[in-house]
Amino acid sequence: MHQPTLRLANKVAIITGAGCVGPGWGNGRATAVRFAQEGAMVFAVDIDAQAMVDTQKMISAFGGDFTPHVADVTLAESVQSMVQACLDRYGNIDILINNVGGPAPGGPVSMSEATFDAQLDLNLKSVFLTCKYVIPVMEQKGAGAIVNIASISGIRFSGAAQVGYAVSKAGVIQFGRVVAIEYAKKGIRINSILPGQLHTPLVDAVLAKTQSGGDLEALLKRRQARIPMPFVGDGRDTANAALFLASDEARFITGTELIVDGGMTAKCD
Protein backbone atom coordinates (compact mmCIF):
# COMPACT_ATOMS: atom_id res chain seq x y z
CA MET A 1 0.00 0.00 0.00
CA HIS A 2 1.34 3.43 -0.93
CA GLN A 3 2.33 5.55 2.06
CA PRO A 4 1.61 9.29 1.77
CA THR A 5 4.67 11.55 1.68
CA LEU A 6 5.21 13.57 4.81
CA ARG A 7 4.58 17.22 4.00
CA LEU A 8 7.75 18.52 5.64
CA ALA A 9 10.05 15.57 5.07
CA ASN A 10 13.74 16.57 5.21
CA LYS A 11 12.86 20.17 6.09
CA VAL A 12 14.60 22.04 8.90
CA ALA A 13 12.25 24.32 10.83
CA ILE A 14 13.18 26.90 13.43
CA ILE A 15 10.18 27.47 15.69
CA THR A 16 10.52 30.26 18.23
CA GLY A 17 8.42 30.25 21.37
CA ALA A 18 8.22 26.47 21.17
CA GLY A 19 7.67 26.08 24.90
CA CYS A 20 4.45 26.55 26.83
CA VAL A 21 3.45 28.28 30.08
CA GLY A 22 1.32 25.33 31.18
CA PRO A 23 -0.56 22.20 30.12
CA GLY A 24 -2.41 22.31 26.83
CA TRP A 25 -1.83 23.46 23.29
CA GLY A 26 -0.02 26.75 22.91
CA ASN A 27 0.77 27.91 19.40
CA GLY A 28 4.47 27.09 19.66
CA ARG A 29 4.11 23.67 21.24
CA ALA A 30 1.37 22.65 18.81
CA THR A 31 3.39 23.84 15.81
CA ALA A 32 6.51 22.00 16.93
CA VAL A 33 4.58 18.76 17.43
CA ARG A 34 2.63 19.09 14.17
CA PHE A 35 5.74 19.86 12.13
CA ALA A 36 7.60 16.92 13.63
CA GLN A 37 4.64 14.67 12.80
CA GLU A 38 5.04 15.76 9.17
CA GLY A 39 8.74 14.89 9.10
CA ALA A 40 10.38 18.22 9.92
CA MET A 41 13.59 18.45 11.88
CA VAL A 42 12.45 20.87 14.55
CA PHE A 43 14.94 23.34 15.99
CA ALA A 44 12.86 24.56 18.91
CA VAL A 45 13.67 27.88 20.55
CA ASP A 46 12.46 29.38 23.81
CA ILE A 47 13.82 31.70 26.46
CA ASP A 48 12.98 29.06 29.09
CA ALA A 49 14.43 25.58 28.66
CA GLN A 50 11.97 24.10 31.15
CA ALA A 51 9.04 25.31 29.06
CA MET A 52 10.14 23.03 26.22
CA VAL A 53 10.45 19.82 28.25
CA ASP A 54 6.90 18.59 27.67
CA THR A 55 7.05 19.60 24.01
CA GLN A 56 10.16 17.46 23.59
CA LYS A 57 8.53 14.53 25.40
CA MET A 58 5.53 14.66 23.06
CA ILE A 59 7.74 14.63 19.98
CA SER A 60 10.10 11.97 21.33
CA ALA A 61 7.10 9.71 21.97
CA PHE A 62 6.62 9.21 18.22
CA GLY A 63 10.29 9.40 17.28
CA GLY A 64 10.29 12.93 15.92
CA ASP A 65 13.45 14.98 15.45
CA PHE A 66 13.61 17.78 18.07
CA THR A 67 16.51 19.96 19.16
CA PRO A 68 15.87 22.48 21.96
CA HIS A 69 17.78 25.76 22.08
CA VAL A 70 17.55 28.58 24.61
CA ALA A 71 17.62 32.09 23.15
CA ASP A 72 16.23 35.58 23.68
CA VAL A 73 15.01 36.61 20.24
CA THR A 74 14.83 40.28 21.22
CA LEU A 75 18.66 40.37 21.31
CA ALA A 76 20.71 40.33 18.10
CA GLU A 77 23.63 38.33 19.52
CA SER A 78 21.28 35.68 20.85
CA VAL A 79 19.54 35.38 17.48
CA GLN A 80 22.85 35.11 15.63
CA SER A 81 23.91 32.32 18.00
CA MET A 82 20.54 30.60 17.47
CA VAL A 83 20.94 30.61 13.69
CA GLN A 84 24.50 29.32 13.89
CA ALA A 85 23.49 26.58 16.32
CA CYS A 86 20.77 25.42 13.93
CA LEU A 87 23.24 25.37 11.04
CA ASP A 88 25.76 23.46 13.17
CA ARG A 89 23.09 20.89 14.05
CA TYR A 90 21.32 20.48 10.69
CA GLY A 91 23.33 22.40 8.10
CA ASN A 92 20.28 24.17 6.72
CA ILE A 93 17.18 26.27 7.48
CA ASP A 94 14.09 25.73 5.32
CA ILE A 95 11.37 27.16 7.54
CA LEU A 96 11.15 29.89 10.16
CA ILE A 97 8.11 30.19 12.42
CA ASN A 98 8.10 33.44 14.40
CA ASN A 99 5.85 32.64 17.33
CA VAL A 100 7.31 34.69 20.20
CA GLY A 101 4.93 37.29 21.58
CA GLY A 102 2.50 38.24 24.28
CA PRO A 103 0.14 41.01 25.39
CA ALA A 104 0.29 43.64 28.11
CA PRO A 105 -2.79 45.56 29.23
CA GLY A 106 -3.18 49.31 28.92
CA GLY A 107 -3.71 52.28 26.64
CA PRO A 108 -1.36 55.19 25.92
CA VAL A 109 -2.02 56.88 29.27
CA SER A 110 -2.08 53.89 31.59
CA MET A 111 0.76 51.97 29.91
CA SER A 112 4.29 52.93 30.91
CA GLU A 113 6.81 53.85 28.27
CA ALA A 114 8.97 50.92 29.36
CA THR A 115 6.09 48.48 28.86
CA PHE A 116 5.29 49.92 25.43
CA ASP A 117 8.92 49.56 24.37
CA ALA A 118 9.00 46.01 25.73
CA GLN A 119 5.89 45.13 23.71
CA LEU A 120 7.50 46.37 20.51
CA ASP A 121 10.65 44.39 21.27
CA LEU A 122 8.84 41.16 22.13
CA ASN A 123 6.26 41.15 19.36
CA LEU A 124 7.90 43.04 16.48
CA LYS A 125 11.65 43.45 16.93
CA SER A 126 11.92 39.69 17.49
CA VAL A 127 10.49 39.11 14.00
CA PHE A 128 12.86 41.67 12.50
CA LEU A 129 15.90 40.06 14.12
CA THR A 130 15.12 36.45 13.23
CA CYS A 131 14.39 37.42 9.63
CA LYS A 132 17.56 39.53 9.52
CA TYR A 133 19.75 36.51 10.27
CA VAL A 134 17.71 33.66 8.76
CA ILE A 135 16.90 35.20 5.38
CA PRO A 136 20.55 35.27 4.19
CA VAL A 137 20.73 31.51 4.80
CA MET A 138 17.57 30.95 2.76
CA GLU A 139 18.74 33.37 0.07
CA GLN A 140 21.92 31.34 -0.49
CA LYS A 141 19.91 28.29 -1.50
CA GLY A 142 17.10 30.23 -3.19
CA ALA A 143 14.25 28.86 -1.12
CA GLY A 144 12.53 29.26 2.21
CA ALA A 145 9.23 29.78 3.97
CA ILE A 146 8.66 32.18 6.87
CA VAL A 147 5.45 32.29 8.85
CA ASN A 148 4.93 35.09 11.36
CA ILE A 149 2.32 34.62 14.06
CA ALA A 150 0.55 37.96 14.33
CA SER A 151 -2.96 38.43 15.78
CA ILE A 152 -6.40 39.69 14.84
CA SER A 153 -5.57 42.45 17.34
CA GLY A 154 -3.42 43.86 14.55
CA ILE A 155 -6.49 44.55 12.40
CA ARG A 156 -9.35 45.11 14.86
CA PHE A 157 -10.17 45.78 18.50
CA SER A 158 -10.56 42.35 20.05
CA GLY A 159 -12.08 43.17 23.42
CA ALA A 160 -9.23 44.45 25.61
CA ALA A 161 -7.18 47.66 25.71
CA GLN A 162 -3.73 46.39 24.73
CA VAL A 163 -2.32 49.21 22.63
CA GLY A 164 1.27 47.97 22.61
CA TYR A 165 0.20 44.49 21.54
CA ALA A 166 -2.19 45.75 18.85
CA VAL A 167 0.33 48.16 17.36
CA SER A 168 3.19 45.66 17.36
CA LYS A 169 1.06 42.91 15.79
CA ALA A 170 -0.10 45.34 13.10
CA GLY A 171 3.59 45.97 12.49
CA VAL A 172 4.23 42.24 12.11
CA ILE A 173 1.54 42.06 9.42
CA GLN A 174 2.96 44.95 7.39
CA PHE A 175 6.53 43.74 7.95
CA GLY A 176 5.54 40.42 6.38
CA ARG A 177 4.01 42.09 3.34
CA VAL A 178 6.95 44.38 2.67
CA VAL A 179 9.64 41.73 3.14
CA ALA A 180 7.67 39.18 1.12
CA ILE A 181 7.78 41.46 -1.93
CA GLU A 182 11.48 42.17 -1.45
CA TYR A 183 12.37 38.47 -1.47
CA ALA A 184 9.71 37.00 -3.75
CA LYS A 185 12.10 36.59 -6.67
CA LYS A 186 14.65 34.98 -4.31
CA GLY A 187 12.36 32.03 -3.70
CA ILE A 188 11.50 33.03 -0.13
CA ARG A 189 7.84 33.17 0.88
CA ILE A 190 6.67 35.19 3.89
CA ASN A 191 3.14 35.08 5.28
CA SER A 192 1.37 35.84 8.53
CA ILE A 193 -1.20 33.97 10.60
CA LEU A 194 -3.69 36.02 12.60
CA PRO A 195 -5.05 33.86 15.42
CA GLY A 196 -8.18 35.01 17.18
CA GLN A 197 -9.17 34.34 20.74
CA LEU A 198 -7.89 30.80 21.09
CA HIS A 199 -7.89 28.90 24.36
CA THR A 200 -4.17 28.42 24.96
CA PRO A 201 -2.34 27.98 28.28
CA LEU A 202 -1.54 31.72 28.16
CA VAL A 203 -5.22 32.43 28.74
CA ASP A 204 -5.27 30.40 31.95
CA ALA A 205 -1.88 31.55 33.22
CA VAL A 206 -1.95 35.25 32.35
CA LEU A 207 -5.10 36.67 30.77
CA ALA A 208 -7.50 35.38 33.42
CA LYS A 209 -5.58 37.48 35.94
CA THR A 210 -5.14 40.64 33.85
CA GLN A 211 -8.57 40.71 32.19
CA SER A 212 -10.92 38.91 34.56
CA GLY A 213 -9.59 39.21 38.09
CA GLY A 214 -8.73 35.53 38.17
CA ASP A 215 -12.17 34.35 37.02
CA LEU A 216 -11.19 32.04 34.16
CA GLU A 217 -14.70 30.74 33.55
CA ALA A 218 -16.10 34.26 33.10
CA LEU A 219 -13.28 35.15 30.72
CA LEU A 220 -13.84 32.06 28.60
CA LYS A 221 -17.57 32.81 28.36
CA ARG A 222 -16.88 36.36 27.19
CA ARG A 223 -14.39 35.16 24.60
CA GLN A 224 -16.75 32.44 23.31
CA ALA A 225 -19.57 35.00 22.96
CA ARG A 226 -17.47 36.93 20.42
CA ILE A 227 -16.91 33.87 18.20
CA PRO A 228 -19.57 32.83 15.64
CA MET A 229 -18.49 29.18 15.68
CA PRO A 230 -19.80 27.13 18.62
CA PHE A 231 -16.40 26.33 20.08
CA VAL A 232 -13.06 28.00 20.83
CA GLY A 233 -9.99 26.92 18.91
CA ASP A 234 -6.56 26.29 20.39
CA GLY A 235 -2.91 26.20 19.31
CA ARG A 236 -3.50 23.20 17.07
CA ASP A 237 -5.55 25.38 14.75
CA THR A 238 -2.65 27.82 14.44
CA ALA A 239 -0.28 24.90 13.90
CA ASN A 240 -2.33 23.47 11.02
CA ALA A 241 -2.47 26.87 9.35
CA ALA A 242 1.30 27.24 9.77
CA LEU A 243 1.82 23.77 8.33
CA PHE A 244 -0.03 24.71 5.16
CA LEU A 245 1.79 28.02 4.69
CA ALA A 246 5.19 26.44 5.38
CA SER A 247 4.60 23.51 3.03
CA ASP A 248 5.08 23.34 -0.71
CA GLU A 249 1.28 23.26 -1.04
CA ALA A 250 1.42 27.04 -0.50
CA ARG A 251 4.11 27.57 -3.13
CA PHE A 252 2.19 30.43 -4.83
CA ILE A 253 1.19 32.21 -1.61
CA THR A 254 3.28 35.05 -0.20
CA GLY A 255 2.79 38.48 1.32
CA THR A 256 -0.61 37.72 2.77
CA GLU A 257 -2.43 36.73 5.96
CA LEU A 258 -4.46 33.73 7.06
CA ILE A 259 -7.03 34.53 9.76
CA VAL A 260 -7.73 31.73 12.25
CA ASP A 261 -10.51 33.07 14.48
CA GLY A 262 -13.75 31.12 14.03
CA GLY A 263 -15.29 34.00 12.08
CA MET A 264 -14.75 36.66 14.73
CA THR A 265 -13.31 39.32 12.42
CA ALA A 266 -16.11 38.75 9.90
CA LYS A 267 -18.70 40.00 12.39
CA CYS A 268 -19.92 43.57 12.04
CA ASP A 269 -20.39 44.14 15.77
Image: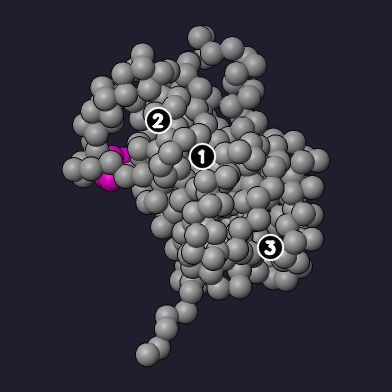
Picture quarter containing residue 95? bottom right
Q: Name the residue under label 2.
A: 203
Q: Residues within 10 Å of mark 2 (few under 14, many from 20)?
A: many
What color scheme is it? one colour
Can residue 235 be spotted in the picture?
yes
Task: Give the Cα distance between marks 3 and 2.
Answer: 31 Å
Q: Which of marks 1 and 3 is nearer the N terminus?
A: 1
- Residue at 27% x, 45% y: name it: 263
- Residue at 54% x, 13% y: name it: 111
Q: Give the range drawn in magenta.
A: 262-266
Can residue 211 be spotted in the picture?
no
Q: Nearer the viewer, residue 26 or 165?
A: 26
Mark 2, secondary structure of its residue: helix
Task: Give the Cα distance between marks 2 and 1.
Answer: 11 Å
User: Which amino acid, by three-letter code, is at mark 1?
Assistant: Cys
Left or right: 162, with 181 as reference point = left
User: Which amino acid, by three-letter code, is at mark 2?
Assistant: Val
Examine the rendered structure and indicate whether residue 221 appears above or below residue 34. above
Label 3 close to label 2 by CB (< 8 Å): no
In the rendering, at what x and y percent does residue 247 appear?
50, 67
Number of the front mark, 1 or 3: 1
Q: Earlier in the sequence, mark 3 or mark 2?
A: 3
Q: Name the residue under label 3.
A: 93
Number of the front mark, 2 or 1: 1
- Residue at 47% x, 79% y: name it: 5
Task: Give the Cα distance between marks 1 and 3.
Answer: 23 Å
In the image, is residue 208 part of the stretch drawn in magenta?
Answer: no
Q: Nearer the viewer, residue 140 or 28?
A: 28
Q: Name the residue under label 1.
A: 20
> What is the quadrant of the N terminus in the image?
bottom left
User: Which amino acid, by three-letter code, is at mark 3?
Assistant: Ile
